[in-house]
C-alpha cells in the first residue's frame, strides 16, 4: 500500500501506542478521584498540558483538552455567539474554511447572526486588506484557518491577528493541519483561540485541544462536572490525552527533519506531474504551503474515477477533505480560488508523510500518468 492521504489522518506512532496502553487497563482510574491513583492521573494530565502549552508558547491554563478539531471549532464560534452577542452579531471567516467552521456559521446564521465569508485570491490567501474592509462595529469574532486542509495554503495569520487585535476583536485559527508540522507561536502572533487535533500528527483519533488565551471570555460548551477548570465537563480521555502528548513530543522533535523529507518528495512529484502530464494545474501556492501537501487538477479528468483507479494499485489519495468525501459536488475550496467545475472535479489531493519514500512517489506518478492518458483516450 502507498498511503498518500496524511491530511485525512496519520498512523499512530508505535511509541504512542506503547505510552497509551497502560492507561487503558492498568492506570484506568478516574483523574477526578480523591484517592492517590486519581491524583496521580490528574498530575499526569497537568504534565501533558504543560508540554502542549510550551509547544505553542502558551500558558498551561490556556490549554483545554477536547475531542478534536471539530469540537474546538464549534466551541469558539458558539462561545462568541453566547458571550459577545451584546456587542454585535457579526462574524467573519473565510470562504475556504473546514466544514467544522462553515456549518457552524450556517447554524449561527439560522439563529440570526450575520457571517461574512472572505474571498481569497487565486493561491488561496486571505488578503489583510480584504479583512480590514469586512470589519464592522458589530463584529464579534474573526476565524481564519492557519493552513488549508485541501490546498495547503499557509495564511498570513500574524497579519490577520494584528488586524483583529487592533480592532479589539477575538481571533481564532483552526490549526488542525498546521500544528506539529510547522512552528506556531501564540506569543508572537495575536491569536486568542487555536484548534488542534491529535490524529493529524501521529496521535489517536477523538482527542485534541483548544488554546484559549488568558482573559478571553469562554463559556462551557458542555455542562456537568468541574473538569478542565469548569470549562469542559466530562471525564477526561486519559489514554487519548497521554497519546496526544507523546505524539506531539515526537512530531515536534522531528518537525524540521520530517518537513524537509516531505517537501522534497512533494516537490519531486509536483515537478513531474506539471512537466510531464499535459493540461495540469497546481492548486494553491507553490511556496507558502504545508510541506507534504500537493493539490493538482487534471483538465478533462474525473477526479473520483482517477482516485478509484489508483486504489486498484493500492495507492491511496483523495479529492479533498475526508469530511466531505461522500459529496460529489466540486470542492468549495477550489471554487473559492476561482477554478471552474471541470478543473475542480478533476483535482487530486496528495499529502505526503515522513514514512513515504522516493520509490513510492515515482510509482505513484507512473500510475497517475498512465491512468490520465487512459481516461483522456476514452473521452
Image: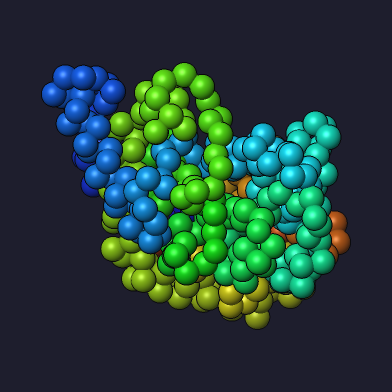
Q: Where residue 238 sits in the image (x, y, percent)? A: 31, 31
So how many labels did they put on this image?
0
For residue 240, say whether it is visible: yes
For residue 293, say whether it is visible: no
Q: Residue furthest left?
A: 36
Q: Residue at x 16, y 24 (%)?
A: 37
Left or right? Give the position of 227 relative to 9: left
Q: Where residue 63 sits in the image (x, y, percent)? A: 41, 45
Q: Is residue 352 above or below residue 176?
A: below
Relative to the observer, which residue lies in front, 375 or 225?
225
Left or right? Give the position of 121 relative to 146: right
Q: Residue at x 75, y 65 (%)?
A: 131
Tell me, what colour scheme is on the image?
Answer: rainbow
Q: Where residue 47 sits in the image (x, y, percent)? A: 24, 45
Left or right? Give the position of 280 relative to 213: right
Q: Is residue 140 above or below residue 233?
A: below
Relative to the observer, which residue lies in front, 61 or 18?
61
Q: Quadrant of the C terminus?
A: bottom right
Q: Is residue 198 above or below residue 157?
A: above
Q: Is residue 379 above or below residue 36?
A: below
Relative to the observer, which residue lies in front, 378 or 34?
34
Q: Residue at x 42, y 40 (%)?
A: 64
Q: Where residue 109 sits in the image (x, y, percent)? A: 81, 37
Left or right? Give the position of 165 relative to 297: left
Give the quadrant of residue 254.
bottom left
Q: Residue at x 74, y 75 (%)?
A: 278
Give the quadrant of residue 353.
bottom left
Amino acid at each position: 500500500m502507498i498511503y498518500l492521504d496524511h491530511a485525512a489522518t496519520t498512523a499512530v506512532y508505535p511509541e504512542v501506542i506503547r505510552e497509551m496502553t497502560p492507561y487503558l487497563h492498568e492506570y484506568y482510574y478516574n483523574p477526578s478521584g480523591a484517592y492517590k491513583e486519581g491524583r496521580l492521573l490528574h498530575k499526569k494530565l497537568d504534565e501533558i498540558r504543560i508540554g502542549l502549552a510550551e509547544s505553542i508558547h502558551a500558558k498551561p491554563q490556556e490549554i483545554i483538552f477536547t475531542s478534536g478539531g471539530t469540537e474546538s471549532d464549534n466551541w469558539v464560534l458558539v462561545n462568541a455567539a453566547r458571550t459577545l452577542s451584546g456587542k454585535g452579531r457579526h462574524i467573519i471567516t473565510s470562504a475556504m474554511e473546514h466544514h467544522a467552521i462553515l456549518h457552524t456559521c450556517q447554524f449561527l446564521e439560522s439563529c440570526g447572526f450575520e457571517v461574512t465569508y472572505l474571498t481569497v485570491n487565486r493561491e488561496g490567501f486571505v488578503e489583510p486588506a480584504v479583512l480590514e474592509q469586512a470589519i464592522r462595529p458589530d463584529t464579534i469574532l474573526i476565524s481564519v484557518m492557519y493552513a488549508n486542509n485541501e490546498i495547503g495554503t499557509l495564511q498570513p495569520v500574524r497579519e490577520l491577528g494584528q488586524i483583529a487585535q487592533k480592532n479589539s476583536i477575538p481571533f481564532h485559527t483552526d490549526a488542525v493541519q498546521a500544528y506539529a508540522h510547522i512552528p506556531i507561536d501564540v506569543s508572537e502572533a495575536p491569536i486568542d483561540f487555536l484548534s488542534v487535533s491529535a490524529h493529524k500528527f501521529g496521535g489517536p483519533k477523538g482527542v485534541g485541544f483548544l488554546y484559549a488565551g488568558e482573559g478571553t471570555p469562554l463559556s462551557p460548551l458542555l455542562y456537568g462536572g468541574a473538569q478542565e477548570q469548569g470549562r469542559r465537563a466530562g471525564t477526561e480521555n486519559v489514554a487519548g490525552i497521554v497519546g496526544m502528548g507523546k505524539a506531539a513530543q515526537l512530531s515536534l522533535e522531528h518537525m524540521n527533519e520530517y518537513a524537509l523529507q516531505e517537501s522534497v518528495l512533494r516537490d519531486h512529484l509536483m515537478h513531474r506531474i506539471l512537466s510531464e502530464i499535459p493540461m495540469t494545474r497546481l492548486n494553491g501556492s507553490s511556496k507558502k504551503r504545508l510541506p507534504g501537501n500537493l493539490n493538482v487538477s487534471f483538465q478533462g479528468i474525473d477526479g473520483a474515477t482517477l482516485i478509484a483507479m489508483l486504489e486498484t494499485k493500492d495507492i491511496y489519495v483523495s479529492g479533498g477533505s475526508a469530511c466531505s468525501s461522500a459529496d460529489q459536488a466540486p470542492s468549495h475550496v477550489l471554487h473559492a480560488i476561482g477554478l471552474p467545475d471541470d478543473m475542480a472535479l478533476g483535482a487530486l489531493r496528495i499529502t505526503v508523510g515522513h514514512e513515504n519514500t522516493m520509490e513510492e512517489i515515482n510509482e505513484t506518478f507512473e500510475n497517475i500518468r498512465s491512468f490520465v492518458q487512459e481516461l483522456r483516450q476514452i473521452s
